Amino acid sequence: MSHAVFVYRVQDARGHVIAGQIEAATAAAAQQQLRSDGFTVLELEEEDGLGSLFPRRVTRQDIIYFTSQLAVMVDTGITLSAALDGVLQQEANSTLKDVLTDLKSTVEAGDDFSAALAKHPKLFDRTYVSLIKASEATGSLGEMLERIAAYLRKEVETRSKIRAALAYPTVMLVMAVAVTVFLLTFIMPKFMPLFERQGVELPTPTKFMLALSGAVTHYWYLWTVLGVAAVVGFVASRRTPRGRQGWDWLKINAPILGPMFRKVALSRSVRTLGTMISSGVSVLEALDLTAEVSGNHYYRQLWLSVRTRVTTGLQINECVSGEPLVPRVLVQMIKAGEDSGRLDQVLLKISNYYDHDVDQAVKAVTSLIEPLMIVVMGFVVGGIAMALLLPIFSLSRRPG
């Protein structure tokens, strides 16, 4: 008899919840086996076979929703273990459900919540873990969870804005390439017999386009290989330190897009630094985490340099003064915050300002790129069209 795979959640004699899989002929047989092993069966369902091959991905929105739910429960006075169990019962994502089961078991075993989260670095980064660790020292877990949820929402919003700003030029670029290939491979070859029969003297632009059309048509496999190699090379290079460094330099120095990426990096950095300091994280650790989440090699090096110089007794504003990556107005606001002893509040206000600034930058980029891409497409398509029309004009001027 063939056996099926069943996913289970059971409770052992000490009350610990354990999740796993078991093979059995039927659900009843699986349940009997678990009971005979001394477990109390909480959940048991047959796996559909796709789950193990294609486990459901845990998104950033899933983490935000989990954090918000947990914050509400903890704020109402429910113990952390009971709150985790409550979220666990409602969770539909099987992958996240397994993670929550492990978090609950680890907490019930006596470990800190931050230690339990640190076991899953792909879902809970160092920033998340550090903020939870800071809240454990002050007993403000519920408030901290709300703050983390708000922080994560801001991060998701910023990423969405960047994707929206880049989506339009990407689509336009793909369309421009597709139209160009279509004209060169399908339209241009149809005119070649006409030009040859009429014996018309072809102008230089038409000769160039016909040569390009022949190269694309007859050596399409070579162009395909080159295109795939370029894409693979670009992706591979971004995974190397030197490649990432070059890409990060291009992002913050590119025309039109550069100022937007700078504002995004500053917004993310200042928000992280302000959230960390206001949550009780030490300045050195806050600067270390700010460097980690900045999202750009050059801003990462900047904040690591600030961290090193702060250990010598300098203030943050003195460390960033004169840095080309940091606007003078930001240096002045940081100095005001340090002088007044309200650096955390000032940083959070600055992050809100930069969030608004990012919105304006995205709108400005979109408004500039749209006509630019239209001009580029018009130039490409118009150039090919003119290459076709020039010989036709010559034919029309011939005496009948």
Image: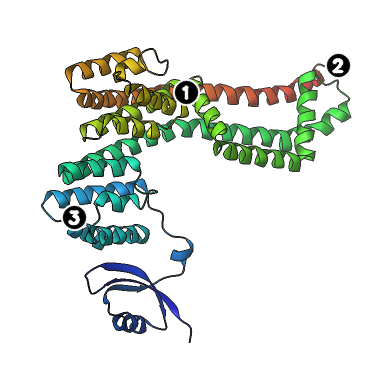
Residue extending farthest front: 312
Depth check: 95 or 191 in front? Answer: 95
Between circles 2 and 1, the one closer to the viewer is: 1
Identify the image quadrant of the C terminus. Answer: top right
- Categorize mark 2 by other alpha carbons within 10 Å: few (<14), some (14-19), many (20+): few
Q: Residue at x 48, y 87 (%)?
A: 1
Which residue does the numbered mark 1 point to in the structure image? Answer: 252
Give percent across and percent down for residue 395: 81, 21
Of the two numbered discs 2 and 1 on the same chain, state the one appearing first in sequence: 1
Between circles 3 and 2, the one closer to the viewer is: 3
Of the two numbered discs 3 and 2 on the same chain, state the one appearing first in sequence: 3
Residue 72 visible within the image? yes
- How many callouts does the rendering have? 3
Give percent across and percent down for residue 26: 38, 83
The amino acid at mark 3 is Leu
Callout 1: helix, strand or loop?
helix
- Categorize mark 3 by other alpha carbons within 10 Å: few (<14), some (14-19), many (20+): some
